[in-house]
Image (tube, rainbow, N blue to C red):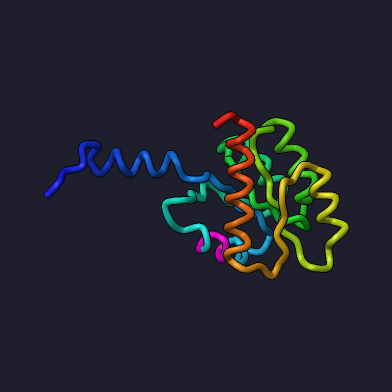
Amino acid sequence: MLENPLGTESQTTIIRDMAIKLVIVDDAPFIREVLRHIFVGPEFQVIGEARDGQEAVEICQRLRPQVVLMDIVMPRMSGIEATMEILKELPETRVVACSTVDQNSMVLRALDAGCCNYVIKPFKAEDVLSAVRAAARLGSKEAGV
């Protein structure tokens, strides 16, 4: 039997360090739960969740995620306002907007605010995964990785 020279703990740390660090923002608890289940596995690490834009700004400032999956319409502070606040302090973070089909003008405003991509609710798991992967790759290219 071959031994892992890094050891199991070191290997887990390396995988965790390579995972896309993600914050999920949505005012609907069941949507956050569904998204959390979509991002299970070694490729992703959900490092935080928020239920409104104001909470999202605070969590992102503290946790510094690579990607934020951001609902657009939320109480206290919209996803558009939160995106602008987050990107002001963390320009390397990528934000993917989430909206319902009837919010096309809001999607355009979100893209103008700095979102790099968007997904439409109801979404397919693969669409959300692809959007977050693309956002993470965009951030890596711009960071010179």
Pick the front one: 55 or 117: 117
- Work out whether 110 lies above or below 73: above
Residue that lies at the very extreme toward the right in this rendered image = 105
Pick the front one: 88 or 57: 88
| Spot occupied by residue 77 in the image (x, y as percentages of width and height) | 78, 48
Is 59 within the magenta? no
Could you tell whether 94 is left or right of 104 in the image?
Answer: left
| Spot occupied by residue 133 in the image (x, y as percentages of width and height) | 58, 50
| Spot occupied by residue 66 in the image (x, y as percentages of width and height) | 58, 40
Q: Quadrant of the C terminus?
A: top right
Q: Main secondary structure of the magenta part?
A: helix
Could you tell whether 77 is left or right of 5 in the image?
Answer: right
The residue at the point 55 percent across, 64 percent down is: 33
The residue at the point 84 percent across, 56 percent down is: 106
Count of labels shown? Answer: 0
Could you tell whether 134 is left or right of 71 in the image?
Answer: left
The residue at the point 70 percent across, 60 percent down is: 119
The residue at the point 59 percent across, 43 percent down is: 137
Q: Which residues are magenta?
A: 33-37
- Work out whether 121 lies above or below 59: below
| Spot occupied by residue 57 in the image (x, y as percentages of width and height) | 68, 41
Residue that lies at the very extreme toward the left in this rendered image = 1
- Work out whether 76 lies above or below 90: below
The quarter holding residue 17 reads: top left
